[in-house]
Image: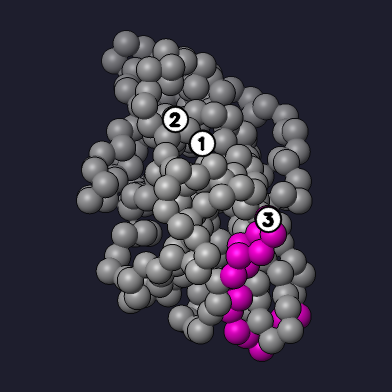
Amino acid sequence: MALLAAPLLAPRALAGTTGGVRDGEVRGVSVRPASGKVEVVIDLQGAAVVQDFTLSNPARLVIDLQGARLTGRVTLYDGQNRGGIRNVRYGQFKPDVVRVVIDLDALKDYQVERAAGQVRVRIGTERTGFAAWSSNTVAPPAAVAAAPRRTVERTASSEAPAPPVTGGPESAARVTTPSLGRPMSIDEYLAAHHADAAQSQAARITVQWDNASIEDVIAGFAAFSGRTIILGKDIKGNVTAEVKNQPWDLALNAVLESQG
């Protein structure tokens, strides 16, 4: 899903914010019901410049927190439609910018307000009979038993490099079919590529998945990296794993390799 489309409205800075060096920390995101509206609340500690704009096809509201870094864990939204909010994605869009993307049923009037330790995004709705969601209260994935390993042995001819992720910021990244043979687990892949991770300059991601579909996982990587990632039709499955402080592209390859 593309994040870089022509905006309907030019980015605007929230009143009361200024430029310059910032030291903001984004610690979490939540979606809450309110009277006649739904609120997306961003836990922001410290100073940051807040900008917002909308995108169409599909309808999205984007909040950029300039001069901020993401210190809370990245948690995938549970997929429940809350007052017209279909999905919430967030990540370290640039070294000094945290981006929050709110997928909507349709573009509506909204307000962005800075309060003590929070940025509140209020969107009008008549559908407020839902339970709140917070990235900080999602339970970590439960421990699962390791699946039996396949007996297929890798030979020199069956060894293949990790599935490449190609494309620059202005083009779509394409994910190809993973390598043949027994799939490596995510932990195995990251351990085998420890040296690559140490040398990588790519933005680092910390994320947990609890039986998440591969489509949702890839959407999370797209939101984090700001790229369009095209998933091959032959890549299927769910993911239960945790990745800590790894280059995002290496983590993506690890997930794809684990799907076999």
| Earlier residue among tags 3 and 1 | 3
| Earlier residue among tags 2 and 1 | 1
Residue neighbourhood size for the residue with mark 2, other residues' Cα within 10 Å, grouped as few (<14), some (14–19), many (≥20)? many
Q: Between label 3 and label 2, give the one nearer the viewer.
A: 3
| Earlier residue among tags 3 and 2 | 3
The kind of secondary structure element at disc 2 is: strand
The kind of secondary structure element at disc 3 is: loop
Instruction: Specify whether 219 is left or right of 38.
Output: left
Tell me if label 2 and label 1 are in contact, CB under 8 Å: yes
Q: Which residue is mark 2?
A: 247
- In three-dimensional space, the C-alpha distance between marks 2 and 1, rounded to whole angstroms, equals 6 Å
The kind of secondary structure element at disc 1 is: strand
**For residue 123, which numbered disc appears in the image?**
none
Residue neighbourhood size for the residue with mark 1, other residues' Cα within 10 Å, grouped as few (<14), some (14–19), many (≥20)? many
- In three-dimensional space, the C-alpha distance between marks 3 and 2, rounded to whole angstroms, equals 29 Å
Query: Residues in magenta?
Result: 113-129
Residue 121 picture location, percent across and down: 59, 70
**For residue 205, which numbered disc appears in the image?**
1
Tell me, yes or no, whether the highlighted magenta stretch contains residue 127: yes
Query: Label 2 is placed on what type of residue?
Result: Pro
Q: Residue drawn 26% across and 50% down?
A: 172
Residue 260 picture location, percent across and down: 45, 33
